[in-house]
């Protein structure tokens, strides 16, 4: 499945620096003035998975295929964007299709980097962006005009959902924090409403803050419900400066600031967690590959991720856990030791399952 993340935030919070650090090359302009990013920046990176390198050695293949993730960096929003302030909210259309939103919030102080409101106030910055996303969703909803005369049952359900969502948003409640009925969920998904998308808060901090976020970061955001479960702490400037160094050297330098993982890894891990995603693996002479699926996906549906024929003609799946596969150096010994299970279509896939699908078309 396609995984994509849209990067939003106020101007000069470090969105473009983060984007460049994630992609490990200079694509987005990054400068000390608002609206440096005009056209959306789009980049694709591989999702790191060390398990694939190990599998490739075992099955003796050089072809490794990682899942991909797309990042979209759009122009910064300001208060009043929905009314045309700054560059307006026209660039929000570029992230309508993303799986989740990475909301970059600035906590670092730097007199050389101007803040649009001349003060660092992460709580107010958060509320500004959420409000603009709500207004964009209301704009989308206003375009949904109920047909005159008799309407179908499906149309009735849809417009009841539209009215329900309008009531929620008009109270200033972001969609992703609201409890929704089935009708409202249907509308939010169908219209790709922005404030209803899962959010990862990217807390852009300085060297002192990143070394001890429990002390210097999270207490400032407690009132708006931001904690370790829905956020990542990143020093975007530092990671952007190190992007051209080999990974080992980057990690050694970052560990001096008590940073154990690069920003890309942290953001992807949080994205998988918030979106409820896992990976199953395939390993053979031709290639090794990781496939991204939702938690709770059945074996038949997982087969369809590889090819629709696999799902249509599904017979069974041979499954072995990653650790067992590695310990037994591949399929042959894993089968001999009874560690490979033949499962049916209703088997629920687990992260790290290595699978061979049997099908007939």
Image (tube, rainbow, N blue to C red):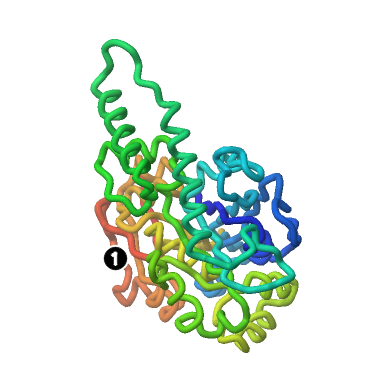
Q: Nearer the viewer, residue 148 or 270?
A: 148
Above or below, comparing residue 85 to residue 47 in the picture = above
Q: Nearer the viewer, residue 190 or 316?
A: 190
Residue 262 place in picture, x, y as percent: 59, 74
Above or below, comparing residue 315 to residue 226 in the picture = above
Which corner quadrant holds the C terminus?
A: top left
Classed neighbour count for the residue bearing mark 1: other residues with Cα under 10 Å, few (<14), some (14–19), many (≥20):
some
Q: Residue at x 56, y 80 (%)?
A: 210
- Identify the secondary structure beneath mark 1: strand
Compared across the picture, whether 122 is left or right of 155 comes to: right
- Is residue 39 visible to the viewer in this orientation of the structure? yes
Residue 231 place in picture, x, y as percent: 46, 67
Residue 41 place in picture, x, y as percent: 67, 50
Compared across the picture, whether 243 is left or right of 313 comes to: right
> Residue at the front extreme?
118
Q: Which residue is mark 1?
A: 341
Q: How many marks?
A: 1
Above or below, comparing residue 241 to residue 20 in the picture = below
Splitting the image into 4 quarters, where does residue 219 fall? bottom left
Q: Residue at x 57, y 56 (%)?
A: 9
Splitting the image into 4 quarters, where does residue 106 fall? bottom right
Q: Residue at x 62, y 89 (%)?
A: 256
């Amino acid at each position: 499945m396609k995984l994509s993340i849209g990067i939003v935030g106020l101007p000069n919070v470090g969105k473009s620096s983060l984007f460049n650090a994630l992609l490990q090359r200079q694509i987005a302009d990054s400068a000390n003035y608002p609206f440096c990013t005009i056209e959306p920046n789009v980049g694709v990176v591989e999702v790191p998975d060390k398990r694939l390198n190990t599998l490739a050695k075992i099955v003796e293949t050089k072809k490794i295929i990682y899942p991909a993730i797309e990042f979209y960096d759009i122009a910064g929003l300001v208060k009043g964007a929905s009314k045309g302030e700054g560059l307006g909210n026209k660039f929000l259309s570029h992230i309508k299709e993303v799986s989740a939103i990475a909301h970059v919030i600035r906590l670092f102080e730097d007199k050389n980097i101007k803040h649009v409101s001349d003060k660092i106030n992460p709580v107010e910055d958060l509320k500004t962006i959420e409000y603009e996303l709500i207004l964009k969703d209301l704009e989308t909803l206003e375009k949904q005009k109920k047909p005159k005369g008799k309407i179908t049952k499906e149309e009735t359900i849809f417009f009841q959902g539209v009215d329900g969502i309008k009531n929620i948003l008009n109270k200033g409640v972001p969609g992703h924090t609201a409890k929704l009925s089935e009708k409202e969920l249907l509308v939010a998904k169908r219209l790709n409403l922005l404030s209803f998308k899962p959010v990862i808060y990217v807390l852009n901090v300085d060297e002192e803050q990143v070394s001890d976020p429990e002390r210097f970061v999270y207490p400032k955001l407690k009132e708006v419900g931001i904690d370790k479960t829905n956020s990542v702490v990143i020093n975007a400037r530092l990671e952007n400066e190190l992007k051209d160094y080999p990974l080992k050297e980057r990690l050694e330098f970052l560990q001096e600031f008590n940073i154990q993982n690069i920003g890309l890894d942290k953001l992807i891990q949080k994205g998988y967690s918030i979106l409820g995603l896992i990976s199953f693996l395939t390993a053979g002479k031709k290639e090794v590959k990781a496939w991204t699926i939702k938690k709770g996906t059945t074996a038949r549906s997982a087969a369809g991720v590889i090819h629709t024929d696999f799902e249509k003609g599904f017979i069974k799946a041979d499954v072995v856990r990653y650790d067992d596969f590695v310990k037994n150096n591949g399929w042959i010994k894993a089968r001999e030791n009874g560690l490979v299970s033949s499962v049916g279509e209703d088997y629920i896939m687990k992260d790290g399952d290595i699978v061979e699908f049997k099908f007939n078309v």
